[in-house]
Image (tube, rainbow, N blue to C red):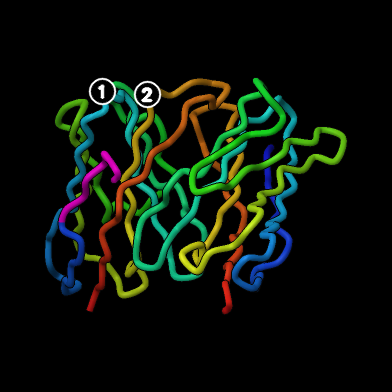
């Protein structure tokens, strides 16, 4: 069982709605990530938080707004999304961010988002 | 820059047969290499990780992978396929800053009776 938990598992939202995806990890990790995965494609990195500070934003549109309230929690706030944003959103964590990438990244089960 | 190439987007084997999923990497620094599995409608689960401690890496569910620097390969194998192995498998490389995982395009494994 994964130790990264995501809620909700499924979300349907209209293009004018505001919603949030939530993620929690209990492994004492200090790095957390959001990935987006379209059908039949590999995950794509969106954001990286290191010690609760945003360290990487992969040029993600501002309609996606991440938040890291504390070292265990990671949110993704969604507003004015487009149908093409429909995808599986994966949260992940690792012990910390290192330059050589040695730390394993552990993924949650994901949140399926459908924008109508 | 780092990259991985997975040869074969779809692999089909008979139950009990050898599983071989191919991954070749490109990296300007010593790489950390991973294999992840994704079952239908689920997240990614770590199968195994190469850290340079040993070239033959054993993972969960009977899978293993061998790191061959001369061939820049990290192929995943399992001696005997089981129906429950049917899933998408991703090879990934990490390093070069920021714990950024670079994934291959994935291989869909089908196991037939």
> Are the numbered discs 2 and 1 placed on the same chain, yes or no?
yes
Element assignment for label 2: loop
Element assignment for label 1: loop
The reply to whether the magenta stretch includes residue A74 is: no
Q: Which mark is residue A95?
A: 2
Determine the residue located farthest toward the right in the rendered image.
Answer: B70
Categorize mark 1 by other alpha carbons within 10 Å: few (<14), some (14-19), many (20+). few
The residue under the point 72% across, 29% down is B55
Q: Is residue B46 above or below residue A32?
A: below
Q: Nearer the viewer, residue B30 or A80?
A: B30
- Give the x, y percent position of residue A11: 18, 67
Q: Is residue A87 above or below residue B75?
A: below
Estimate the spatial distance between the alpha carbons at disc 2 and disc 1, rounded to whole Å: 7 Å
Tag 2 near tag 1, CB within 8 Å? yes
Q: Which mark is residue B2?
A: none
Q: Quadrant of the C terminus of chain A?
A: bottom left
Give the mark nearer the N terminus: 2 vs 1: 1
- Apparent side of residue A56 relative to residue B112 in the rendered image (left or right): left
Q: Nearer the viewer, residue B74 or A51?
A: B74
- Apparent side of residue A19 relative to residue A86 in the rendered image (left or right): left
Q: Which mark is residue A28?
A: 1
The range drawn in magenta is A1-7
- Apparent side of residue A61 relative to residue B79 in the rendered image (left or right): left
Q: Is residue B53 above or below residue B80?
A: above
- Give the x, y percent position of residue B27: 73, 35
- Apparent side of residue B2 relative to residue B108 in the rendered image (left or right): right
The residue under the point 31% across, 75% down is A83
Chain letter, disc 2 residue: A
Chain letter, disc 1 residue: A
């Amino acid at each position: 069982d994964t130790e990264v938990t995501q809620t909700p598992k499924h979300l349907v939202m209209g293009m004018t709605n505001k919603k949030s995806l939530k993620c929690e990890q209990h492994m004492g990790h200090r790095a957390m990530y959001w990935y987006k995965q379209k059908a039949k494609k590999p995950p794509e990195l969106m954001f990286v938080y290191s010690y609760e500070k945003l360290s990487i934003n992969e040029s993600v549109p501002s309609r996606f707004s991440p938040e890291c309230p504390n070292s265990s929690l990671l949110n993704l706030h969604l507003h004015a999304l487009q149908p093409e944003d429909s995808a599986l959103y994966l949260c992940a964590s690792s012990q910390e961010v290192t330059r050589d990438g040695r730390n394993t990244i552990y993924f949650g089960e994901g949140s399926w988002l459908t924008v109508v | 820059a780092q990259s991985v190439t997975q040869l074969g987007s779809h692999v089909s084997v008979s139950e009990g047969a050898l599983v071989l999923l191919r991954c070749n990497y490109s990296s300007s620094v010593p790489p950390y290499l991973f294999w992840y599995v994704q079952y239908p409608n689920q997240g990614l689960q770590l199968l195994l990780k190469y850290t340079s401690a040993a070239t033959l890496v054993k993972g969960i569910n009977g899978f293993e992978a061998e790191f061959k620097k001369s061939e820049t390969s990290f192929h995943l194998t399992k001696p005997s396929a089981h129906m429950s192995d049917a899933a998408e498998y991703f090879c990934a490389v990490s390093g070069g800053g920021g714990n950024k995982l670079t994934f291959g395009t994935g291989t869909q494994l089908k196991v037939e009776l």
